[in-house]
Structures are given as structure tokens and as C-alpha cells.
């Protein structure tokens, strides 16, 4: 008999299994099934089916049904509420989601508070109680604030249970109630594209003097991207630097829309140095190999061809853009040959015409193919240009992303059905958002680029707005002395130049105290002084809005699947204890409120507003488990469609109200900011190809190979790296072309060493023609594993990445790498 779980009650974790054999701080495996003891006459265990959602990634939040026997997850079933036809699809979980049972009950899970007893980075901890943990947290946080000030406290956060209904910003709320903290902007993932879109489409730059930047809220690149379902109306889809078939494979992802577009007859072209699974073996899909980091050169040559052959939509360009033609230039730049057309035609800037013949030796793409691609884009009924994060996750990321954005603009395939703005297809379409606990006002004005967190530990007091991209103040007054690292492996793993970062964190005189919360002893957790064990999302009520790229909207009314093991607690609970020590518990908890109460109030408020017709009551939703709304592609229209139809009546938020191909704001930054490397650190007022640090043009014989990465299908960054079955399903390998492998005596399956001046790692070679000669690549996200000789046996790509940030956003150059490979 299977009973659907509909209430909010908690269950006991199985006695005699996981809890009976807890080690000091680390969990052991619970049984997969609880066997019925028929011989003894005991009743067969009762099975419950409990809805919750996968929390394996930030791309999808796929609904799941947990089959629970006596409080233990027996197995996990994915969504089965729909069908197999388009328009009645099921949002099925990927490999990660299907292995979530192993993740939740993994033997290496942290289940007790622990304090460091060895050197930072050694990973030596001892179990302590919660009272001592809160005392250590309070004592060290108060000491740092009293000694240096609130701006010496920094939060490094990457989610955790923040995807839950009514949660998010708990530490921000707490810190703001005691004077604030140092914040950050952007992400390690795609801030370069956000800046490119911000200046061109959204008016990031303030009209004040100097180099003051007004950067809108996180997600601006999504705000400028066309909704994914519009791709169903496209007959040509051109994707730059996207590995969607591995990074976005949940049931509600963009891959659903791509499949429908293929069914409608769309042709797909994937421009990438590596032939990924999205283009392998599909009849309508083509792979156009390109050298890493040269997408901007290809984009310039495509646009040049469009103008030369009369394919550009000049009527649209004259009426909707600033900076392509001399007559549309702002007064500050008139008569200086600074237009985008001057750049393409060789009459301005570098005086080099951006012909297909110019781009061919840079990109590795024959000029004939470049010209044909330009014609195909312009002659398509509706061309969708996708700009994957691989293009912008480079030292020249802003210029690369902006250059690709010019392709739909010049061709006129912009703001019309089936077209895009040349940005990444968004993860979210009509996802529902709701209010939780408010963070309150932060009294610290300073905001740093998130990628400069380690740099701010070492030289925060030297960092300025015009050199380091600091917002809110002209310069920082403190180094970071206290880090709260919540659910985040971006201290000593997902961080550029990770050996450099680790060396700074090891010095306790620099950052004096680090509090971490994680589910596992990750590479970053080893550098914490205090570790706090958090519940997993499935161990609490968790009403979740589906994040998806598909024509679907879901709410998953997640109920507690199992009792959290050991002494795991939610962040809200331990921060409430900390707030009590600071005398602000009533303010922090809003006079005794809790996340479930806030969730209920927020839910009913959203429902009462009538924004989502048919949205059930919370009680009805809990009984249903999941509520689904489906949309037709006709319900969506491309972003800026109203501006395309009426630019005067629906202007953009840029200073001119139009697409700013030439940005006065960017020119002011170029004139006033300080840059360390004039060869590579360049901010240009128009989109142009900028060779990047350790890119194709930055050749040297010592490190002849370009290195880049892509997202794994078995991990979300480093999450799920603990599951051996997943590791075997998709082995961590270095892709290398046979030409480069033969020159080094490397055969498929050989162990190789990859190294540069920043570090050395070991990995298995995969010899394949699906990567271009001169480049090697691996999946990102493995956990760093340093041996006694300083060699990374885990082979996280950040061992090789520099911290030579992009010039404008000051963000992640993780695909700008040169290295050498040798056979072991």
C-alpha cells in the first residue's frame, strides 16, 4: 500500500541504521531498503511517497517523488505527471537528480559542528557541540567588528537552501542588523556578459562624472535575453560556446525547446572548439570548430560580410541604434572615425578591415564558410543567436559577448518572432518568486567584484573603484578579516588560480577567521576554522518554483523527506542563536517568525494578487505535490519586441533610449580607469575583437596549448563529485586531438600531466577528433586533491587558471589558459 504524504509532520530517521553508527562529524550510509521480517511476524514497512524537488543545480529545479520506508529513502522517482508528447511533457530529472538519494545519505556527509585542529587546508577537525560552535562564531565575529569594523566581514555564498520558498539572505539580514558587511556583485559564471548587455541595452553607466558605475541587480543578462520558447519559431539556431547537452539537461531545460525546434525543421550550428553531445549524431546539427577566445573576430567578420554584401538591416540600424553610423554618434565622438562601421571597414581604430580573410587565420574557420554563415543568418526566416557562457568566461569576456550580440543586431534578426538578442537563453521563463525575510538596509556602502574576494584578503585596503571595480566607495578601508562561507566551494576550489588563493587563506594573519557551512568536507571547507552542518533541502518543507527554460511553470510543494541526521540544523536556526548572543533575536526572527510562516504568508500574498491564474491554495498544493501550468510559444514574445516595433514609444533604459553600440560610459571608463596590462586590459566603447591574456595570439613555446572547460553532466560545479557511480558514468578526462597526442606519444587512456607556471595536475587522456588541434579541454568542477609534491590529483581546472581578471567586470578568466601536456 502506497500512501501519499500530505502533512507537514516530521519523521524519525531510521534507528539502528544511520544514526546508530554516526562517526565523529561524518555520517555513514543508511540502508537502501528496510527488509521486512516476515519470519518474525512483523508488519511489512509502510511506504510513503513524498514530493520534493532536486537541488542539484541552479539550472532546473525538477520535481521528484521520494519513496520513503520507515523514514529512509528507498528510491527516488522523477516527475510522472505529464506525458511523452510536446505540450504535455514530464519534467524528468537528470543523472544528478536521480542520484540524490546517494547524495543525501552519503557516508562522508558532515553532520556535527566541528572546529579546525590542524593547519588551514589540512582538513583536520574535531567534533564540538552547538553551544561551543555559536560561542566561537560570536567571539570571533565580534572581535573582528570591534577591531576593524563591519566592512572587514565578507559573505561568500553560493546557494545552499537559498532556493527554498521564503528563504535567502539570512546572513545578510543578520549582519545588517548589527551594522552591515562587505558585499559582492556578479558571479563567477557570467558577469562579463551581464556587463556587456548592461552597457549596450540597459544603461549601466551613470550620467555623473568620473568613473562611477551603476550596475543593476544580478541577472541583467537574463533580463536582456529572449525567452527560450521563442526558439520554437526559429528555422536557424546558431549557438556560440554552449554545452547545453551536458550543462542544461534537466527535464524543464532549454533542451526541450531545442528538441521542438528540431521537430519543426530548424537547422542548428554549434560554434565551439569542442564538438559536444548537443551536435554529435543529430541530422540537422552542424559543428563549426573555432579557436578558443576568437568568437569576437568571427562576429566582426560576419557583420563585415553583411554590410559588404548588402545584407545588413540598415533601416533598423538607423532607427534603433547609436554608434554604427556617423550621424548616430553622440556629440562627444562625432568626426573621430569611432563608429562601429569604421571599425569593421578599417577606417578607424586599428585601421584593419575585418574581412572574412582577416578572421580566418585567427579563428581557424575558412573565409568561405564565414561568408556563407553570414548569408544564412540574414536569409533565415528567423535566426536565433545563442551566446553561451563559454564565450564570456574569458579574460576578454566582455568584448567577446558584446561582439556576438552584434550579429542579430546587424542582421536585423532582433526583437522579432523566433529571434534573440544574442545572449544566453535564460534558465528561467515564468518562474514564480516570492518574498521571504527581508535583508534590511546595509550600512556598509562598499561592494567588490565577487572574484576579487581573495585579493581583498591580501590587499583590500589598496583596492579602488578605478583599478579594482569597487562600487559604492572610492576605495576600501580594510582587508577582509572574517569570511562566512555558506554552501560554497569558491574559496579554494572554484576560484581562479586556486594555488595562489590557498596560499593566502593558509596565512591566518590575513583572514583571521573563516566560518563555513557545507554538506561535505569540500576543498574550501578544509580552509575553514569552524564548520557548521546544514540540513539538505529535502530535509525541510521546501516549496519551490521550477527554474526552467521550457514552456512550463511548476510549483513543487516539497515536504520533509527524512529527518536530518546527527546535529544538522538550518542556517536560519543557528543564525537565530547567534542573533540572541548579539541581543537582536526578536528583530532577526521578526518576533519569533520562522521560514515556514514566511513561506505561507508569501505564498498567499502572491496567490491573492491573481498573477498566476489557477494557482491552488497552499493546502491544495500540498495535497497535489506539484502544480503545473503549460504555455504555448505564442504566449511569449522576444525581449524588446515592443522597442523593435516602436522605439520612440518604448525606449530602452540606456541614456539614448536606443541600442548603444557606441557607449559614452565605456569610453569614460577607458579614459579614467587604471589598468595593469595595457596589451590585454582594454575597455573599448564599441564591440570589437580583443585578443585575450593567454589566448590564441599570446603564443609561447613553453606552454603551447590552449586550455578550456565545459560543464559536467554529473556535477553542478563540484556538487555531486562525491558520488563514485557518477564518476564512473562520466570519467574525468582531458580531451586532446590526435595531432597533439601523437606529437607527445599519448594514447587514449594514458595518464598525463598538465601544467603551467601556476600549477600541475594529473588526469586521464581522451584522444579524440572532437576537439580542434592546439587546444585541450576538461570538465570543470572536480575537487582539488593536492599530494605531498603539490600535484593536483583531482585535476580541478582552476589549478591552471590565472587571476588576470577581465578588464571591465573584473571577473573570471577561467577559459583563458595556456599549458603544456606530457605523458606520465
Image: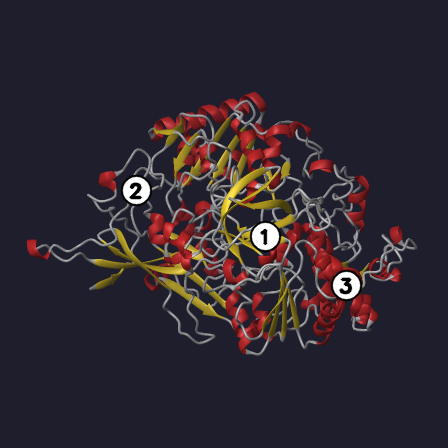
Give the label, 3 or 2, closer to the camera.
3
Seen as rendered, the residue at the extreme right is 335
Q: Along the polypeptide, which appears first: circle 2 or circle 1?
A: 2
Which circle marks residue 14 in the picture?
none
What crowding class fits label 1: few (fewer than 14 Cα within 10 Å), some (14-19), or many (20 or more)?
many
Q: Earlier in the sequence, mark 3 or mark 2?
A: 3
Report the residue marked by disc 1. 776
State the image coordinates of residue 524 (x, y, percent, origin top left): 48, 37
Q: Position of residue 132 (x, y in %)?
A: 36, 26
Determine whether, in the image, residue 11 is placed left or right of residue 240. Answer: left
Q: Is residue 12 left or right of residue 758?
A: left
Upstream in the sequence, badge 1 or badge 3?
3
Nearest to the observer: residue 447 or residue 342? 342
Quarter holding the N terminus?
bottom left
The numbered dot on residue 565 is 2
- In the rendered structure, the answer to whether residue 736 lies left or right of residue 436 reads right
Nearest-to-viewer mark from 1 and 3: 1
The answer, for residue 548, to whether it is visible in the render is no
In the image, residue 574 sits, relative to residue 64, either above or below, namely: above
- Distance, label 2 to label 1, CA atoms, is 42 Å
Mark 1 and 3 residues: CB-CB less than 8 Å, in contact? no
Q: Position of residue 69 (x, y in %)?
A: 23, 55
Asked if 92 appears above or below 672 in the picture, the reply is below
Q: Which element carries disc 2, helix, strand or loop?
A: loop
Q: Nearer the viewer, residue 491 or 170?
A: 491
- Element type at marker 1? strand
When asked about the image quadrant of residue 801, the answer is top right
The dot on residue 301 is: 3
Amino acid at each position: 500500500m502506497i500512501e501519499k504524504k500530505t502533512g507537514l509532520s516530521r519523521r524519525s530517521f531510521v534507528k539502528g541504521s544511520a544514526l546508530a553508527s554516526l562517526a565523529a562529524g561524518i555520517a555513514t550510509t543508511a540502508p537502501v531498503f528496510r527488509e521486512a521480517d516476515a519470519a518474525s511476524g512483523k508488519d511489512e514497512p509502510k511506504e510513503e511517497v513524498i514530493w520534493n524537488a532536486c537541488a542539484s543545480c541552479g539550472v532546473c529545479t525538477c520535481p521528484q517523488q521520494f519513496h520513503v520506508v520507515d523514514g529512509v529513502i528507498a528510491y527516488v522517482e522523477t516527475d510522472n505527471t505529464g506525458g511523452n508528447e510536446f505540450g504535455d511533457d514530464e519534467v524528468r530529472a537528470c543523472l544528478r537528480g536521480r542520484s540524490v538519494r546517494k547524495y543525501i545519505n552519503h557516508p562522508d556527509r558532515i553532520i556535527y559542528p566541528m572546529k579546525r585542529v590542524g593547519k588551514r587546508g589540512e582538513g583536520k577537525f574535531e567534533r564540538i557541540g552547538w553551544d561551543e560552535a555559536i560561542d566561537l562564531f560570536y567571539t570571533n565575529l565580534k572581535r573582528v567588528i570591534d577591531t576593524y569594523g563591519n566592512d572587514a566581514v565578507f559573505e561568500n555564498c553560493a546557494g545552499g537552501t537559498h532556493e527554498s520558498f521564503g528563504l535567502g539572505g539570512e546572513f545578510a539580514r543578520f549582519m545588517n542588523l548589527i551594522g552591515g558587511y562587505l558585499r559582492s556583485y556578479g558571479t563567477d559564471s557570467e558577469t562579463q556578459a551581464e556587463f556587456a548587455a548592461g552597457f549596450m541595452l540597459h544603461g549601466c553607466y551613470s550620467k555623473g562624472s568620473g568613473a562611477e558605475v551603476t550596475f543593476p541587480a544580478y541577472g541583467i543578462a537574463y533580463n536582456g535575453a529572449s525567452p527560450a520558447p521563442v526558439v520554437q519559431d526559429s528555422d536557424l539556431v546558431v549557438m556560440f560556446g554552449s554545452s547545453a547537452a551536458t550543462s542544461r539537461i534537466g527535464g524543464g531545460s532549454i533542451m526541450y525547446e531545442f528538441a521542438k525546434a528540431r521537430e519543426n525543421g530548424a537547422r542548428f550550428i554549434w560554434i565551439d572548439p569542442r564538438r559536444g553531445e548537443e551536435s554529435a549524431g543529430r541530422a540537422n546539427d552542424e559543428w563549426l570548430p573555432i579557436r578558443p577566445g576568437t568568437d569576437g573576430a568571427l562576429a566582426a567578420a560576419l557583420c563585415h560580410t553583411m554590410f559588404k554584401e548588402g545584407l545588413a538591416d540598415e533601416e533598423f540600424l538607423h532607427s534603433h541604434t547609436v554608434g554604427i553610423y556617423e550621424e548616430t554618434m553622440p556629440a562627444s565622438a562625432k568626426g573621430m572615425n569611432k563608429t562601429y562601421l569604421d571599425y569593421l571597414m578599417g577606417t578607424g581604430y586599428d585601421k584593419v578591415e575585418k574581412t572574412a580573410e582577416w578572421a580566418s587565420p585567427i579563428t581557424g574557420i575558412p573565409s568561405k564558410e564565414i561568408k556563407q554563415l553570414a548569408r544564412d543568418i540574414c536569409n533565415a526566416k528567423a535566426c536565433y543567436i545563442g551566446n553561451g557562457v563559454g564565450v564570456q568566461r574569458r579574460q576578454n569576456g566582455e568584448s567577446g559577448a558584446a561582439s556576438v550580440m552584434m550579429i542579430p543586431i546587424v542582421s536585423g534578426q532582433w526583437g522579432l518572432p523566433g529571434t534573440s538578442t544574442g545572449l544566453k537563453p535564460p534558465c528561467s521563463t515564468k518562474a514564480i518568486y516570492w518574498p521571504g525575510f527581508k535583508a534590511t538596509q546595509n550600512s556598509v556602502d562598499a561592494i567588490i567584484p565577487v572574484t576579487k574576494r581573495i585579493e581583498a584578503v591580501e590587499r583590500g585596503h589598496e583596492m579602488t573603484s578605478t583599478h579594482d571595480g569597487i562600487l559604492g566607495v572610492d576605495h576600501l578601508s580594510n582587508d577582509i578579516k572574517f569570511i562566512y562561507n555558506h554552501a560554497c566551494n569558491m574559496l579554494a576550489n572554484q576560484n581562479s588560480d586556486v594555488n595562489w588563493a590557498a596560499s593566502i587563506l593558509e596565512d591566518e594573519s590575513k583572514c583571521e577567521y573563516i566560518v563555513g557551512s557545507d554538506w561535505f568536507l569540500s576543498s574550501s571547507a578544509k580552509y575553514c576554522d569552524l564548520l557548521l552542518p546544514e540540513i539538505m533541502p529535502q530535509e525541510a518543507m521546501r516549496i519551490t518554483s521550477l527554474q526552467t527554460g521550457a514552456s512550463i511553470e511548476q510549483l513543487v510543494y516539497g515536504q520533509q523527506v527524512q529527518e536530518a541526521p546527527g546535529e544538522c540544523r538550518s542556517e536560519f536556526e543557528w543564525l537565530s542563536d547567534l542573533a540572541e548572543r548579539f541581543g537582536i533575536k526578536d528583530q532577526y526572527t521578526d518576533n519569533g517568525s520562522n521560514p515556514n510562516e514566511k513561506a505561507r504568508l508569501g505564498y498567499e500574498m502572491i496567490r491573492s494578487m491573481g498573477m498566476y491564474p489557477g494557482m491552488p491554495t497552499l493546502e491544495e498544493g500540498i495535497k497535489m505535490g506539484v502544480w503545473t501550468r503549460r504555455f504555448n510559444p505564442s504566449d511569449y514574445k522576444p525581449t524588446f519586441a515592443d522597442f523593435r516595433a516602436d522605439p520612440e514609444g518604448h525606449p530602452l533604459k540606456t541614456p539614448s533610449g536606443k541600442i548603444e553600440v557606441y557607449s559614452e560610459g565605456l569610453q569614460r571608463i577607458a579614459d579614467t580607469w587604471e589598468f595593469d596590462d595595457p596589451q590585454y586590459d582594454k575597455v573599448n566603447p564599441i564591440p570589437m575583437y580583443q585578443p585575450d591574456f593567454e589566448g590564441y595570439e599570446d603564443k609561447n613555446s613553453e606552454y603551447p596549448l590552449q586550455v578550456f572547460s565545459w560543464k559536467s553532466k554529473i556535477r553542478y560545479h563540484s556538487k555531486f563529485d562525491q558520488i563514485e557511480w557518477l564518476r564512473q558514468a562520466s570519467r574525468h578526462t582531458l580531451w586532446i586531438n590526435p595531432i597533439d597526442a601523437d606529437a607527445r606519444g599519448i594514447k587514449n587512456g594514458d595518464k598525463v600531466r598538465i601544467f603551467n607556471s601556476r600549477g600541475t595536475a594529473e588526469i586521464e587522456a581522451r584522444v579524440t577528433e572532437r576537439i580542434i588541434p592546439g587546444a585541450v579541454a576538461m570538465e570543470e568542477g572536480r575537487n582539488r586533491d593536492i599530494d605531498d609534491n603539490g600535484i593536483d590529483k583531482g585535476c580541478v581546472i582552476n589549478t591552471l587558471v590565472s587571476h588576470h581578471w577581465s578588464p571591465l567586470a573584473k571577473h573570471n578568466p577561467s577559459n583563458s589558459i595556456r599549458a603544456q601536456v606530457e605523458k606520465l
